[in-house]
Amino acid sequence: MAGQLAQAHGGDVLALQVVVVPEPVPLDAGRRRAQAGRALLEQALVLAHEANLPVQTMTRVARGVGQGILDTAADEQADLILLGWQGPSRSRSGSLGQIVDAVLRDATCDVLVVRGDGAILPKRILVPTAGGPHARAAARLALLLAQGGGEAVTLLCVQVGPSTSQQVEQDRCRIEETLEGLAPEQPPRQRMVPAASVVEGIVQEAQGHDLVMLGVSEETLLDRIMFGSVPLQVAARVPHTILVQAYRGLTGIWTRRVTRTLLRTLPTLSDEEQAELRHALSQGAQPGIDYFVLIVISCIIASLGLLLDSPAVVIGAMLVAPLMSPILAFSLGLVLGDLRLIRFSAEAILKGVALAGIIAASIGLLSPLKT
């Protein structure tokens, strides 16, 4: 795939091997390791020559794989970085892995993250789009592949919910925005399909294509944690998926670096502390006698505070109420994707709220203080 893109773009392929040397060890010591792993590069070079592809090889010694890739791309003024990827992990944090994340954060060029066999020669390429620079980069690279082998490219907009004429027009504008400045020799197909969700629409349409090229999304952190990243969900269900990130300039790189620096200043918990916190919140999410007794007491105090029109008494009831523990456990369950913790904490919250409502209604009906 790298060779096909290079030929279509009139460029060369640089096959890179990064040899990692730990921090205390001098970088010069990595030369022996580099020589030992040279066989893999030689094999790639033989295959490239057999396919008549313009390929060069390089071995780089670095402290980390991601940093080695970034340094080489900067030194060689690369236009595109192509990375292999095993697929999404079980984490719902929206991470592609330590190496891929590092490259995506600081790359000074476009990046392709390839899941599946990169040697595939696709006949039909699907490019989902909702507008934006990453989708445009995906369409541009898909058209380069299509020009090299005559494949058909389909630009897809997924319509969630009832389709209206206004939504159809918006999707058409998104497709035109994606194709802006590309000027393909053969216009790609355009499809607008309704679906229950964006992921379902893409997965369903992907069944008629050999390859899906999907621009990385710019979802908020909360969206990625609660619902998972759309590209990762698609990649988990479609074997041949390529994630595309367009280069956004130095401003984007420095913005991400400043954000990471600020985040590092925030207090963090160790692994042991995180496990201890999770255990404590899990215990608090299981209601017992103490939980229900505190609910009754806090509800009585709060009801009396309302009847007496005393904010201080109501605040005192808030200090007694035990609902905060299951609420925190429910939040932790959402972050971790722990369905068992979510179920237990939600059950505790609903039971506590129901009991509080019954107690409050009873006090309101029986109290002689009501006017």
Image (spheres, rainbow, N blue to C red):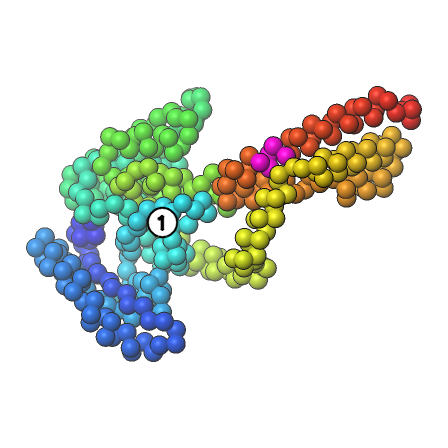
Which sits in the foreground, 120 or 313? Answer: 313
Q: In this view, does 348 lie above or below 49?
A: above
User: Is 225 positioned to the left or the right of 117 in the image?
Assistant: right
**Residue at the limit of the structure toward the front, as seen here:** 289
- Is 347 magenta? The answer is yes
Q: In this view, does 9 lie above or below 371?
A: below
Q: Which amino acid does label 1 sit on?
A: Gln
Find disc 1 in the rendering and name its residue: 245
| Residue 271 position in % (x across, y down) | 52, 57
Please tell me how crowded label 1 is: few (under 14), some (14-19), or many (20+) other residues with Cα within 10 Å. Answer: many
Q: Is mark 1 on a helix, strand or loop?
A: strand
| Residue 105 position in % (x across, y down) | 41, 56
- What residue is at 69 percent from the left and 30 percent from the top? 353
Please tell me whether the stretch drawn in magenta is mainly helix, strand or loop: helix
Residue 23: quadrant of the picture = bottom left
| Residue 15 position in % (x across, y down) | 21, 60
Identify the image quadrant of the C terminus. top right
How many labels, in total? Answer: 1
User: Is 232 positioned to the left or the right of 49 in the image?
Assistant: right
User: Is 278 positioned to the left or the right of 78 in the image?
Assistant: right
Q: In this view, does 95 lie above or below 150?
A: below
| Residue 233 position in % (x across, y down) | 38, 39
From where the camera sits, is residue 276 visible? yes
Which sits in the foreground, 341 or 173? Answer: 341
- What residue is at 74 percent from the left and 30 percent from the top? 356
- What residue is at 28 percent from the left and 36 percent from the top? 126
Q: Give the range drawn in magenta.
A: 344-348
Residue 67: quadrant of the picture = bottom left
Which sits in the foreground, 25 or 240? Answer: 25
